[in-house]
Amino acid sequence: MPGDTRTRRTVMGVRIDLHAHTTASDGTDTPAMLIDRAVRAGLDVLALTDHDTTAGWAEAITAAAGRITLVPGAEFSCVHVTAEGRRISMHVLGLLFDREHEALRTERRRLRHSRELRARRMVERLQADGYPIDWDHVTEIAAGGAVGRPHLGRALVAAGVTPTLDTAFRDLLSSRQPYYEPKEDTPVLDCVTLIRRAGGLPVFAHPFARRRGPVVDHDVIAAMTSAGLVGIEVDHPDHDPSDRAEAADLAAQLGLVPTGSSDYHGANKTSGLGICTTTPEAYQALLSIPTARSALPPDSDGTAG
Ligand code: AMP
Ligand code: FE
Ligand code: FE
Ligand code: ZN
């Protein structure tokens, strides 16, 4: 039976997706819905990595119990400032860290606050130019999740300003547009250090996703590695074949674990869950590094969170 999960597992091996979002940030599935979808997609391991928050962990842990291995994590908003003073926005996944670690927790709270201030400022700028968008509608769409530009984009689409989320980003929300306001992201080396101190595994997310904006040079990734980076996303929907080759070469050169992931966001993006995956060898290499907490195997009772 072609759709049978067990058949697929035998043919293709264990399926591991180490980067996905929920309504706790800018995804559209609740954590429980995400787990259901991951099970239906035949995944064996899923990392939950909402932007700057662990608010989805408890629901996901309960939903995953007895069904799928869950790797609790988050995707941290970081910045690298070049010698010329250019700010390059970056994302670093933190997997299996201690969510009670005080300094990292404080940093997540600060980042979420900065997200809100910046989103309010972007709403004001759009309003000043006559676009029908209001903050209450944006918060309604974000529904308590860490607020991000996709929520602004959905408000603009709902108001009929622009046809799709993609055009909202291209024409109004991208860092190249005048309405854009940067968040006060964490300096990337500090973030890597902090994730390690909290017992987590830092993985550089979509390092060469150039469509989103400028990307960092290899020397920055080498400095991140010296600070404790352990992995780098190679297979990612925003990487073309040459980006993947570049990331794979760099991983080999720097001794980083090459990962793969869908960066699933539900209806806020087109990538399906499990569209890119991590090899079992890479996953084992990550798990061989001591962490503050363990991946929750499918036979866990969900109370360990
Ligand atoms: P923010 O974190 O608020 O700066 O917004 C960045 C987020 O927007 C990324 O994490 C992506 O999830 C999302 N994003 C970026 N480009 C697009 C796009 N063209 N369409 C939909 N979502 C996007
Ligand atoms: Fe996102
Ligand atoms: Fe990201
Ligand atoms: Zn992501």
Image (cartoon, rainbow, N blue to C red):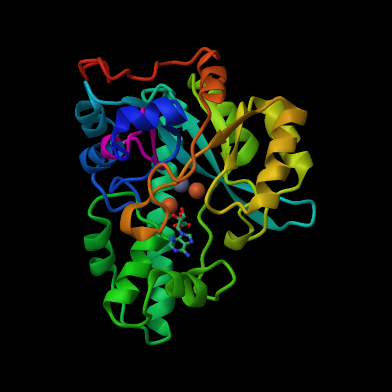
Work out whether 10 lies above or below 137: above
Query: Residue 288 appears in which quarter of the rendering?
Result: top right
Image quadrant where one finds the N terminus: top left
Q: Is residue 152 left or right of residue 80?
A: left
What residue is at 66 percent from the left and 51 percent from the top?
241
Q: Is residue 82 left or right of residue 14?
A: right
Where is residue 259? Give x, y as percent.
56, 34
Query: Residue 273 appears in which quarter of the rendering?
Result: top left
Work out whether 103 lies above or below 121: above
What residue is at 56 percent from the left and 24 percent from the top?
282
Part of the protein shown in magenta = 39-54
Q: Is residue 278 magenta?
A: no
Q: Is residue 229 left or right of residue 10?
A: right
Look at the image and tell me whether residue 153 can be seen.
Answer: yes
Where is residue 153? Give x, y as percent.
37, 69
Query: Residue 29 or 17: which is nearer the viewer?
Result: 17
What residue is at 45 percent from the left and 26 percent from the top?
13
